[in-house]
């Protein structure tokens, strides 16, 4: 697992701490497939591998994460997940795609975890 994070990745660290608090094991962060294709967090809970996209907002007007994941982004996520599954010899029945949406509200955060989304 990559442990060095850039300053701008603080929201991913918040998501990682949240996941660890609910008994997820973090397998990888910022897994890259090709030059700009990346999965934010890969985690495991029980026998399920979760591919997690983290979305961060500072304005409640832009809170809806669905608006920020374009068809092109979904295509890249799917290809990256397919590659990870292939190189790690995983079973598609034991994987899922999640989104963690974080809204910064002055000095605190509101976090929502959307599980088992279709891509």
Image (cartoon, rainbow, N blue to C red):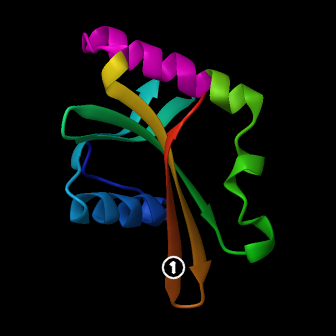
Magenta-colored segment: predominant secondary structure: helix
Residue 14 in the image, given as x and y percentages of width and height: 39, 67
The answer to whether residue 23 is above or below residue 40 is below
Q: Is 44 placed left or right of 38 in the picture?
A: left
The answer to whether residue 117 is above or below residue 77 is below
Q: Is 2 placed left or right of 38 in the picture?
A: left
The answer to whether residue 17 is above or below residue 29 is below
Residue 111 in the image, given as x and y percentages of width and height: 50, 69
Q: Nearer the viewer, residue 61 or 3?
A: 61
Residue 95 in the image, given as x and y percentages of width and height: 36, 27
**Secondary structure of the residue carrying numbered label 1:** strand
- Which residue position is annotated with label 1? 109
Q: Does the magenta stretch include residue 115?
A: no
Q: Which of 67 and 46 is in front in this view?
A: 46
Residue at screen point 42% across, 13% down: 83
Q: Can residue 34 be seen in this view?
A: no
**How many marks are shown on the rendered structure?**
1
The answer to whether residue 61 is above or below residue 52 is below
Question: Which portion, as a residue range, is magenta?
Answer: 76-92
Quadrant of the drawing holding the N terminus: top left
């Amino acid at each position: 697992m990559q442990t060095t994070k850039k300053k701008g990745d603080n929201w991913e660290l918040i998501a990682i701490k949240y996941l660890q608090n609910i008994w997820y094991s973090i397998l990888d962060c910022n897994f890259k497939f090709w030059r700009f294709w990346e999965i934010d967090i890969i985690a495991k809970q029980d026998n399920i591998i979760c591919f997690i996209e983290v979305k961060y907002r500072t304005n409640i007007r832009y809170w809806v994460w669905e608006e920020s994941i374009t068809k092109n982004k979904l295509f890249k996520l799917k290809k990256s997940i397919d590659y990870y599954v292939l190189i790690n010899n995983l079973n598609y029945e034991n994987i899922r795609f999640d989104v963690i949406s974080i809204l910064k509200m002055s000095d605190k955060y509101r976090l929502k975890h959307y599980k088992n989304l279709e891509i």
